[in-house]
Image: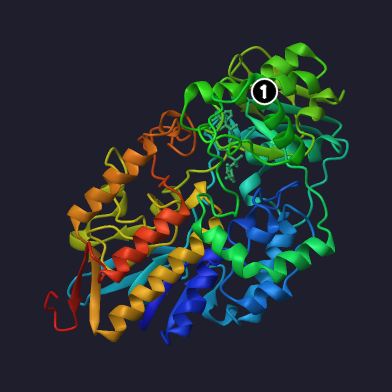
């Protein structure tokens, strides 16, 4: 049985940087990754059109000035191959692969209270003992394929966007069905439509999507950013969402009708989300409705068939389901080879050997694409049998009707020396993930360095501090429209999952200040034990 200092699960943005920092501290660390190589979600999400909707120049690590200077993004929004290329470059540059076991899943991690160590078992039968157990599993990495009746009988090819083959899929001459119109479906649909003989889009909930207006970067812009990365980095870290953009101080309701129209038109033409057009888009239902109305009108302006346009026009509030950025999504429904099927009105009853059957009709299909999303936030953590003190599983503590409880979204009581990078109740998916990941990794490694320097062996949040954090997280979320939405944010997309809103919404700048204050105050809210087991 091998003994090491730390085990890190996942080799995406989180795992790679965590390994780098642990190595800097002189610790022995091992990473485990189910994929063949580095990349995390960007390793698996290879579907046509897969792209990040944070602008490239902000979607990278900022810890190394040399890395910032030597890497050059070519387009405003990075596509999957570009991001995977970047992460491969990082892994090579810092020689990280030598500490990672690929094609290996962590099956279980049990805390041994006597030894004060995590005993970790992999699907290759390897057992390791480590002081620290660190999750870099990501928030959107446990894919969800609904249990449609007859799924296994389908005789054509089927794919999930979150686990796409390495070779391009050829849709030419095929009748293709895409189920799901979230970010993945909306990115893939225009790309598949230009190849397929016919594309059927099975939509349950229409989604708000605005143009990305992706483009190649001008070399002058890149030079300017590179010359100012220090300032850009500071602005990202102090911001709400992890990009330098600031929220305006004007309410949508204070502006005139013409002013609002102008603002929304400008934002639509510039590309990107319309969330930060006014200060109260996600906090005030009336303000929110003004932007919903604008986007619905745009959809009616783009889609020629008014009936199809109506079916594509969302009725929920903008932002309560994650809004999407697209390239030619609504335009795609003007093509003769594309059919929109409303599966809320006419639900899917079964997958059949030769296609799919809704209540009213049968659709012959050669290829089925599931763009049906993820068991977000907790799904990937629950896939591992994680047991803390007294054998309590993380699932017992957080799942099956119990509520998620964390301290700062980075640790949870009863699970000593267990850290969750961008865990539930941190800003995570409502921020630029890379900024949040860097902040968590740096906070965790500083904490470990603090412990090592003081001969502290065990850290664990106390349950009162934890209850306080969860309450605060909920209070902040309740000032917005988001917790009531039926979305993967709240777990409403997974049958039987308890609805909650485990995302800290005060913004990455505020969150960083709180985490830094906790550290500066000797990690207040945590308890420590020294090697001699005396509480300090
Ligand atoms: P999402 O955003 O969860 O979208 C999943 C889509 O699949 C959504 O349209 C769902 O409809 C639909 N869905 C899920 N289950 C079913 C069933 N049973 N029948 C029909 N349709 C279904 O996942 P994505 O992969 O697109 O995006 C996830 C995130 O990754 C994204 O937000 C970015 O942050 C990156 P619903 O809306 O639930 O009615």
* Residue tagged 1: 294
From the viewer's perspective, tell me whether residue 338 is left or right of residue 317: right
Q: Is residue 477 above or below residue 27?
A: above
Quadrant of image for the N terminus: bottom left
Depth check: give the residue in front, 456 or 498: 456
Q: Position of residue 303 (x, y in %)?
A: 79, 21
From the viewer's perspective, tell me whether residue 339 is left or right of residue 403: right
From the viewer's perspective, tell me whether residue 348 is left or right of residue 450: right
Mark 1 close to ligand 1, CB under 8 Å: no
Q: Residue at image x 63%, y 18%? A: 358
Does dot 1 land on a helix, a strand or a loop?
helix
Q: Residue at image x 36%, y 41%? A: 476
Depth check: give the residue in front, 30 or 213: 213
Q: Position of residue 273 (x, y in %)?
A: 64, 39
Q: Position of residue 503 (x, y in %)?
A: 42, 45
Name, please, the residue furthest toward the bottom: 26
Q: Quadrant of residue 193?
A: top right
Q: Is residue 382 above or below residue 440?
A: above
Q: Position of residue 319 (x, y in %)?
A: 54, 33
Depth check: give the residue in front, 352 or 36: 36
Depth check: give the residue in front, 159 or 84: 84
């Amino acid at each position: 049985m091998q003994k090491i200092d730390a085990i890190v699960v996942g080799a995406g943005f989180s795992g790679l940087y965590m390994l780098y920092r642990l190595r800097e501290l002189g610790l022995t660390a091992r990473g485990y990754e189910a994929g063949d190589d580095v990349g995390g979600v960007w390793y698996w999400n290879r579907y046509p059109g897969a792209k990040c909707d944070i602008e490239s120049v902000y979607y990278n690590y900022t810890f190394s000035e040399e890395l910032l200077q030597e890497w050059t993004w070519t387009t405003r929004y990075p596509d999957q191959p570009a991001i995977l290329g970047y992460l491969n470059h990082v892994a090579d540059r810092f020689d990280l692969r030598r500490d990672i076991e690929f094609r290996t899943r962590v099956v279980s991690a049990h805390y041994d209270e006597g030894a004060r160590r995590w005993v970790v078992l992999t699907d290759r039968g390897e057992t390791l003992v480590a002081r620290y157990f660190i999750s870099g599993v990501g928030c959107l990495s446990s894919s969800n394929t609904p249990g449609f009746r007859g799924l296994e009988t389908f005789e054509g090819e089927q794919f999930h966007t979150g686990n796409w083959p390495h070779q391009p899929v050829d849709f030419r001459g095929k009748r293709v069905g895409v189920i799901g119109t979230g970010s993945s479906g909306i990115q893939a649909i225009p790309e598949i439509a230009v190849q397929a003989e016919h594309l059927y889009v099975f939509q349950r909930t229409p989604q708000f999507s605005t143009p990305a207006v992706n483009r190649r970067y001008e070399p002058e812009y890149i030079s300017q950013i590179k010359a100012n990365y220090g300032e850009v980095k500071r602005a990202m870290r102090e911001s709400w969402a992890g990009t330098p953009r600031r929220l305006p101080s004007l309410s949508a309701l204070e502006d005139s009708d013409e002013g609002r129209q102008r603002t929304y038109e400008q934002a639509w033409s510039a590309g990107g989300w319309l969330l930060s057009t006014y200060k109260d888009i996600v906090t005030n239902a009336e303000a929110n409705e003004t932007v919903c109305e604008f986007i619905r009108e745009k959809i009616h302006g783009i889609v020629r068939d008014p009936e199809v346009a109506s079916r594509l026009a969302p009725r929920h509030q903008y932002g309560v389901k994650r809004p999407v950025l697209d390239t030619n999504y609504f335009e795609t429904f003007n093509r003769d080879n594309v059919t929109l099927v409303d599966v809320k009105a006419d639900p899917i009853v079964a997958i059949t050997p030769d296609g799919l059957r809704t209540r009213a009709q049968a659709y012959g299909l050669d290829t089925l694409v599931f763009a049906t999303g993820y068991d977000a936030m907790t799904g990937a953590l629950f896939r591992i049998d994680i047991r803390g003190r007294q054998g309590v599983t993380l699932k017992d503590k957080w799942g099956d009707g119990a509520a998620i409880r964390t301290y700062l979204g980075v640790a949870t009581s009863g699970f000593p020396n267990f850290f969750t990078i961008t865990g539930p109740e941190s800003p995570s998916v409502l921020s630029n993930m890379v900024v949040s990941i860097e902040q968590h990794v740096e906070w965790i490694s500083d904490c470990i360095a603090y412990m090592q320097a003081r001969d502290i062996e065990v850290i664990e949040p106390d349950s009162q501090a934890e209850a306080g954090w969860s309450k605060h997280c909920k209070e902040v979320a309740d000032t917005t429209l988001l917790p009531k939405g039926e979305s993967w944010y709240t777990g409403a997309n997974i049958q039987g999952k308890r609805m909650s809103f485990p995302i800290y919404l005060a913004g990455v700048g505020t969150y960083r200040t709180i985490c830094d204050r906790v550290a500066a105050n000797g990690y207040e809210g945590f308890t420590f034990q020294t090697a001699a087991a005396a509480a300090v």
